[in-house]
Image: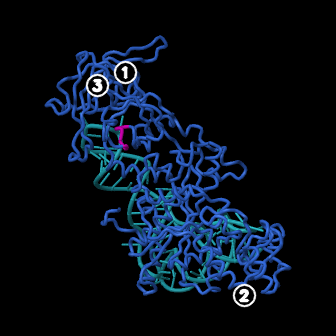
Chain colours: A blue, B cyan
Amino acid sequence: MEASTDTTPTNFIRNIVKADLEAGKHAAIVTRFPPEPNGFLHIGHAKAICLNFGLADEFGGRTNLRFDDTNPLKEDEVYAQAILDDVRWLGFEWDELCHASDYFDQLYDWALHLVREGKAYVDSQDADTIRARRGTLTEPGEDSPFRGRSTEENLDLFQRMKDGEFGDGEHVLRAKIDMAAPNINLRDPVMYRILNAPHHRTGDTWHIYPMYDWAHGQSDALEHVTHSLCTLEFEDHRPLYDWFLDQIPAPSRPRQIEFARGNLNFTVMSKRRLRELVEEKHVDGWDDPRMPTLAGLRRRGYTPASIRRFWRDLGVSKSDSIIDMGVLENAVRDDLNATAPRAMAVLDPLKVVLTNFPEGDTEWLEAAVHPQQPERGSRRVPISREIWVERGDFMEDPPRKFFRLKPGGEVRLRNAFIIRCTDVIKGADGAVTELHCELDPESRSGMPGADRRVKGTIHWVSAAHGQAAEVRLYDRLFSVENPLADKDSDYRQHLNPESLQVVENAWVEPSVLADGAADMHQFERTGYFARDRAAEQGAKAVFNRTVTLRDTWARLLKERAARG
RNA sequence: UGGGGGAUCGUCUAGUGGUAGGACUACGGACUCUGACUCCGUCAGCGGGGGUUCGAAUCCCUCUCCCCCAGCCA
């Protein structure tokens, strides 16, 4: 995984763990990652994954992957499978694979215990009534008329709830705590609801299902989890978490610690909204490369290492944050810059005829797989009389400091020769259709004359050898930083209509599609690209642009334009 | 106006009484057969007001702003 020389930045949770270990509270820590299998994991989940697994790795502890599968109405096996895949892809392996549903029997027994102790009762009010009587943020709730039921009656009713004698919603089991508690979670929270629905793992066995609060802490205790890490919104559930643990003969005593979610700008990060985007076809599935899901990022070309490093570098705290997407992009660039083999691809082709290159000839040039890592060897790149260059690399009437091709100007063809533009050919509409250039044979890469310096270097692909490819360019999914900020408009209104741009006729050099070629490349000067085999229909290769390279020139132009 | 949290460079984050540090971004420069990378340098911050103290991001008071909670969701 990470190089051992990397130092782990500390944070308040790590400090707690360290202190607990030093104090001898635990022989070893146990953490857990507890997703509900009701959707795909996103980059925010990766924070929790890295935190939990990272802590256990660092301190020699264990981490369980536990499916919090207490609501059969929302859950599905396909999500569970996707979650497993994503966690493994991220680079982590769990010690035990657990399910809250594994504990349904134990939970039921403990609930019986609470009933017998007079700490839980069957409430037969309907949902609306329960809600109405819960009180408000400022007013206390009122006791249910069923709150005083006898233990015998509670036991009988609860048994029959379990046996499936009732319809959905007819009764619930509630903890008897305090209807006037200022913390609403303590106003006799529901422990079980009747759901006559099959569960993806327990089938038709159960007609009642435990609520989150009644399942989570107990599951932690059963697994001997020492540090139960969750996000901030559960902070005011902690008193309840502790209360439930106090009522049962728990086999261990876990501690809940909350940290802030990591939000990214220009996207949304709730499963509910991501599901909407998928179901309403605003994107092409959970693994659409524009999605912040791990499946989407993977398809986009993000590497596990870059995501791990991203979260490690950001740290963990309790303050709300919105992380700039640029930070994530920078993390992949960094990783890919070191690992991705280089190649040339032309996305917006303009034909160049090398007038003094013999017709029908092919010359094979040597080009480094990675210029900073000569040990990775070289690839062979063919050139012929006609080549493609990037349309944007030529300007007939260029601005100041334009180092690329212009009439009469010289530029180096990356890995090849210096050429001079001698003619600009235009179509009837005045648009440039073709360039005639003369190459300087002395300036060939690797030859004595190669050290002649020209200011610009551009990439190219031999027209006779280039492979046709489709390239998909991505921009941010939303056009505003925080799509949820405006309470008056729906976040979907802020979807960026230009988040996907399909380039049908790009050309890539042959090495990119050769046998055994990597799926990940840096197309020099344009960005990092991931082969998307799943998207390929016929023979044509498809590439997703993971991220662009930093482009100081483009930024300069933008600034100039802004200044007028 | 109930309860629970939070506020430190643009962003993320260290720092519980002793010169406010790092990372990313931005900016300037060097290098360059990728206007990339790398290297060097620069800018930039303790929400406000009081108080305690020789000394306060840190302790006290007060104000402001932000987030979460009234699912038989998690």
Left or right side of A184 for A40: left
Left or right side of A548 for B34: left
Q: Position of residue A118 (x, y in %)?
A: 74, 87
Residue A308 is a magenta residue? no
Kind of residue at disc 3? Glu
Query: How far apart in space, not on screen, are marks 2 and 3 (Cα)?
Result: 90 Å
Q: Position of residue B27 (x, y in %)?
A: 41, 47
Q: Is residue A88 above or below residue A132?
A: above
Q: Which mark is residue A351?
A: 1
Q: Dot 3 falls on which chain?
A: A
Q: Give A30 or A123, whichever is nearer the viewer.
A: A123
Q: Dot 1 falls on which chain?
A: A
Observer able to see residue A523: yes
Residue named by callout 2: A116
Kind of residue at disc 2? Arg
Which is nearer the N-term, disc 2 or disc 1? 2
Q: Dot 2 falls on which chain?
A: A
Observer able to see residue A401: no
Residue named by callout 3: A410
